[in-house]
Image (cartoon, coloured by chain):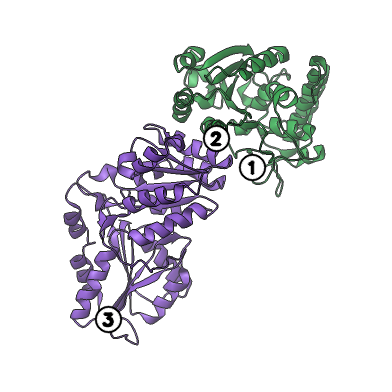
Chain colours: A purple, B green
Amino acid sequence: MAKATRESFGETLLEIAERNPNLVVLDADLSKSTMTQAFLKKYPQRHLEFGIAEQNMIGAAAGLALSGKIPVLTSFACFLVGRLENIRIAAAYNKTNMKLVGTHAGIGIGEDGTSQMGLEDVAAMRALPNMVVLQPADHEETRQAVRWMIEHQGPVYLRLTRQKMPDLHGADYKWGFNKIDVIFEPKTKPSKYQATIVASGGPAPCAVEAAKELEKKGFSVRVANASTLAPFDDEAIARFAKDSQRLVTVEDHNINGGLGSAVCEAAGAHGGGVPIVRLGLREFGESASPEQLYEKYGLSSSAIAEACLKNLG
Amino acid sequence: MTVSAPDLKNVARTLRTDIIRMIEAAGSGHPGGSLSVIDLLAVLYWKFLKHDPQRPDWAGRDRLILSKGHACPALYAVMAHRGYFPKEDLLTLRKQGSPLQGHPDRLRLPGIEFSSGSLGQGLSVGLGMAMAAKMDEASWKTYVVLGDGELQEGQCWEAFMAAPKFKLDNLVAIIDFNNGQIDGPVNQVMNIEPLADKLKAFNWEVQSIDGHDLGAIEDALAKAQKGGGKPHAILAKTVKGKGVSFMENNIAWHGNAPKKDDADKAVSEILNG
């Protein structure tokens, strides 16, 4: 069933709250959008409302974490990561056990437009030592990633979608930290894939659709899903670089500093030699429906398929 | 351990000479703000803080955050004299491998509650600590020592706004009001006055004192122990470079290390002052 990853996050918080009495949730006037409402209704004593003041919320989270609490602080990705210096010091440098949850990632938010779109957050968070960056793409991944995040000691940035995401996995799926998973294989395994698409977050299902279309046209295209963006599963990329004619990255984020960069860095560090096509944002977004925006900015299944075809030999 | 007022005056004198010698040895650092804040830290660490230097992570300890992290030579001197680490280590300030980093680093020096130095963040962190104590119904207190210049950071005002909402009467903000910052006097660079009125309007309990009068500091901190439902602010009027005539109110000594001649002169003035 299709569900926004922000919804899956809100549900999971509620599931794990009882046996994690130190878990506290911090909000900056967006709890209705970040899906912490169910938690705050059930655990009002463990919900702290900071108003529209993210810097203070981030600092307070550090103080709570240093006093034994597990603060989960939520806002839109852009508003949270916009306070980069606060996160740099209070979360990363102090290595505090805070969990930063940025929802409304990318152009997938649609009509609200550019000022509400987190498009640089992964780049900023990847540059911070000690910071783990997670971007699950469906309900099951989100459930397991949230559980892992709460158990993990140290700062984590979790990037979530506003838009509904179809299920990529069944309930038997085992999510692994820092593990790039293959989520689509062509029926006939080739000696060398014509392309391996590495996708993350919002457009991951579109990448699968694109690969299916290309398979119908006779192309052997595999899709992998990167739900951990920092650290990064370099080994998987090195394998893909060897058994694929090219790599295509797909992300709802600026192509600089996000998944596309991570894949280039990993491939380069392992000897390179494989062309890499990066799909994602090169500019700011605008207001329109999410579907229109994914089409225009090259993240829809047809746009991804087209970009692959243009580059397939 | 408590000491009587005259003794603490001697302690503060020694701490001041340590600050001078540390910064001289380091060849860089911030003497002005360290000398203005030292009397506040001395009274806190000798008379108020519940802490155990042998167990810096003791859960029941009071928390102190030096939000104006550049004044860490003062904090290091106090910590050494209270037994957190050997006094000889003070001369390793800012040297490679030293736990005494140029600004406090909690992961390198046990007893530091928060790695500060990026101004404006400390009060928010202290607020989070005070919230945790309230949630746990714990009796420990949180003290945050701020500079006056750093109150120009908007984040401080987010924290000033939030603390009364959460009824954090276990939080004490102590402002080292020396009216000096790198680019000049605070009231010229970007005036923060009338500060007492502003904080009262934000619903804080506010006391204004002479930040070099050990008795007055003690009285103000004693009053701040009594809850009352509101957070406590102590505006401590201080003199940048206090105790060294040629450093006093001279902004050139905000972030400059004295060479041996000046350091000797400073130490001799402090000891005879």
Q: Quadrant of the C terminus of chain A?
A: bottom left
* Discs 2 and 1 lie in a common subunit: yes
> Disc 3 designates what residue?
A220
* Chain containing the residue with disc 3: A
Q: Which mark is residue B106?
A: 1
Do labels 3 and 2 touch, CB within 8 Å?
no
Nearer-the-camera pick, B232 or A2: A2
Label drawn at residue B132: 2
Amino acid tagged 1: Arg
The disc labelled 2 sits on which kind of residue?
Ala
Q: Subunit of mark 1?
A: B
| Residue type, label 3 | Ser
Task: Say which chain tag 2 marks.
Answer: B
Mark 2 and mark 1 residues within 8 Å of each other at the beta carbon: no
Mark 3 vs mark 2, foreground winner is: 2
Indicate the position of residue B41 as horizontal and vertical percent values.
69, 25
Mark 2 Cα shell of 10 Å, populated few (<14), some (14-19), many (≥20): many
